[in-house]
Amino acid sequence: MNLAIIKTGGKQYLVKEGDLVKIEKIPGVAGDAVSFDTLLLTDDKGSKVEVGTPVLKTKVEATIVKQDRADKILVVKYKSKVRYKRNVGHRQPYTQVKIEKI
């Protein structure tokens, strides 16, 4: 089982082959192939660990499974004693990818 830490959308994700991962939205449609170049660490079943300084030259291949939006969260602004209350909803878009090859 190969492990890797990738960086995309300003976040870092620990992935392995066959994983379904929700990441920040990237352009593309379901079925498109994507590759992540910013690889920070790889691990070959504990026998060989490579750490990037700052990144590694290898790539992680993935396939886009779906483009979707997360569940709604409510953002509430409230000020006491002045009868002010404001509700706003937000749904963050994301891309779900399946890791094919490290």
Image (spheres, rainbow, N blue to C red):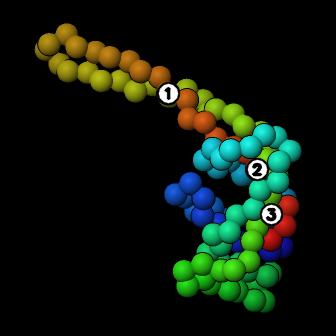
Q: Residue at x 14, y 13 (%)?
A: 82
Establish if 33 lies above or below 95: below
Establish if 36 lies above or below 47: above
In this view, the residue farthest toward the bottom is 47
Name the image quarter holding the C terminus.
bottom right
Q: Residue at x 63, y 61 (%)?
A: 13
Residue at image mark 1: 90
**In this rendering, the label closer to the viewer, 3 or 2:** 3
Quarter of the rendering containing residue 54: bottom right
Q: Amino acid at mark 1?
A: His
Q: Secondary structure at mark 3?
A: strand
Tell which circle, 3 or 1, labels the residue nearer the N-terminal end: 3
User: Relative to 46, is 26 on the left or the right?
Assistant: left
Residue at image mark 3: 61
Q: Amino acid at mark 3?
A: Glu
Residue at image mark 2: 97
User: Relative to 33, is 94 on the left or the right?
Assistant: left
Establish if 10 lies above or below 96: below
Where residue 71 appears, as percent x and y from the top left, is: 60, 29
Establish if 49 lies above or below 34: below
> How many angstroms separate mark 2 from mark 1 (CA)?
22 Å
